[in-house]
């Protein structure tokens, strides 16, 4: 993408307007896509990786099995993921009889709320690295690409007025990791799916998504609809760029400004707060 700017501050805009061709700006949007209803007994084969005792994982796995999917549940614990010593072996065992199966990574779907964003994000990414290393050692079918579905919950804001919880902010850190993994791991097709409420409608829709081979790499399931991520070009006037004061930053955003010379990128540090952003 030519001259993509993530933070178009006024000084940069003025400089770009003086340059040849001017600047082009893009925002991420989500648009509805059609998902076919998958009939029972036509499901695929999956190895599902989740945290032991997670109620959401239990609901989703049960629904997939009722739809006719063959699901091998591999449960692990945060302590085991910290050690990283058992997941590789368990994945090899799971793929023994089903080497052509897809993988669902539900490690981010955990019961309970996140108490600290920075620590939770670091833990999730470290566990994602353990998963990626274990995945690289799994005996996949060599003739076809393996579908790897990564589930998050509340990590995407699909509308301008949508709020993201502290749990969602922590899980959003996984997107950069798995986008990189998708580019660097040959023979793996990574699909990122963000859920919101875990209700019957969402469970049915997820079963339909898993039952259909989609070209979409990033989806958000909201209110019974599947939304695909898109990059849309916008005019400068639509960006409504303006600087915010220190007082506004302290009141409205989930970070606090350090005094000049403090550690942290651009003088920013996370403010740990339990409220919804």
Image (cartoon, helix red, strand yellow):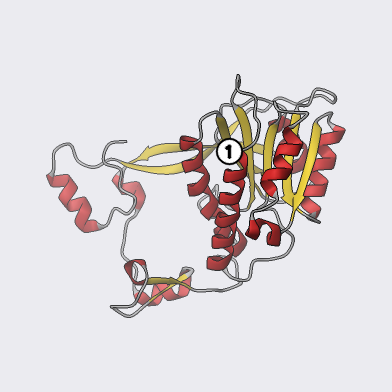
Which quarter of the rendering shows the N terminus? Answer: top left
Question: Front-most of 127 and 38?
Answer: 127
The location of residue 234, given as percent across then percent down, is 35, 41
Instruction: Say which residue label 1 marks.
Output: 136
Where residue 59 appears, as percent x and y from the top left, is 82, 46
Q: Residue at x 61, y 47 (%)?
A: 131
Q: Could you classify mark 1 by the number of other residues whose Cα lies within 10 Å: few (under 14), some (14-19), or many (20 or more)?
A: some
User: Residue most toward the right?
Assistant: 66
Give the residue at x 82% y 48%: 58
Residue drawn at 60 percent across, 50 percent down:
130
Quarter-of-image position of residue 35: top right
Quarter of the image with the C terminus is bottom right
**Image location of residue 31, percent across then percent down:** 54, 36
Q: Is residue 158 above or below residue 139?
A: below
Answer left or right for 134 relative to 70: left
Q: Residue at x 20, y 57 (%)?
A: 11
Q: Would you identify the image quadrant in which residue 256 lies?
A: bottom left
Say which quarter of the image contains residue 213. top right
């Amino acid at each position: 993408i030519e001259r993509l700017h993530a933070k178009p501050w006024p000084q940069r805009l003025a400089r770009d307007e003086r340059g040849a061709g001017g600047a082009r700006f893009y925002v991420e949007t989500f648009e509805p896509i059609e998902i076919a209803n998958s009939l029972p007994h036509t499901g695929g084969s999956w190895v599902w990786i989740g945290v032991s005792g997670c109620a959401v994982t239990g609901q989703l796995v049960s629904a997939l099995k009722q739809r006719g999917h063959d699901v091998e549940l591999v449960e692990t614990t945060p302590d085991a993921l910290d050690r990283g010593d058992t997941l590789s072996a368990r994945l090899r065992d799971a793929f023994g009889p089903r080497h052509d199966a897809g993988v669902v990574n539900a490690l981010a779907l955990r019961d309970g709320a996140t108490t600290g964003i920075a620590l939770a994000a670091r833990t999730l990414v470290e566990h994602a690295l353990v998963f990626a290393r274990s995945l690289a050692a799994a005996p996949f079918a060599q003739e076809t690409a393996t579908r790897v579905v990564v589930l998050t919950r509340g990590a995407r804001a699909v509308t301008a007025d949508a709020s993201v919880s502290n749990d969602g902010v922590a899980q959003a850190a996984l997107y950069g990791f798995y986008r990189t993994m998708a580019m660097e791991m040959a023979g793996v097709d990574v699909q990122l799916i963000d859920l919101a409420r875990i209700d019957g409608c969402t469970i049915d829709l997820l079963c339909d998504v898993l039952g259909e081979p989609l070209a979409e790499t990033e989806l958000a399931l909201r209110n019974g609809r599947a939304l695909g991520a898109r990059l849309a070009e916008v005019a400068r006037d639509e960006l409504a760029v303006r600087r915010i004061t220190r007082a506004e930053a302290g009141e409205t955003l989930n970070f606090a400004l350090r005094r000049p010379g403090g550690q942290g990128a651009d003088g920013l540090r996370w403010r740990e707060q339990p409220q919804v952003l």
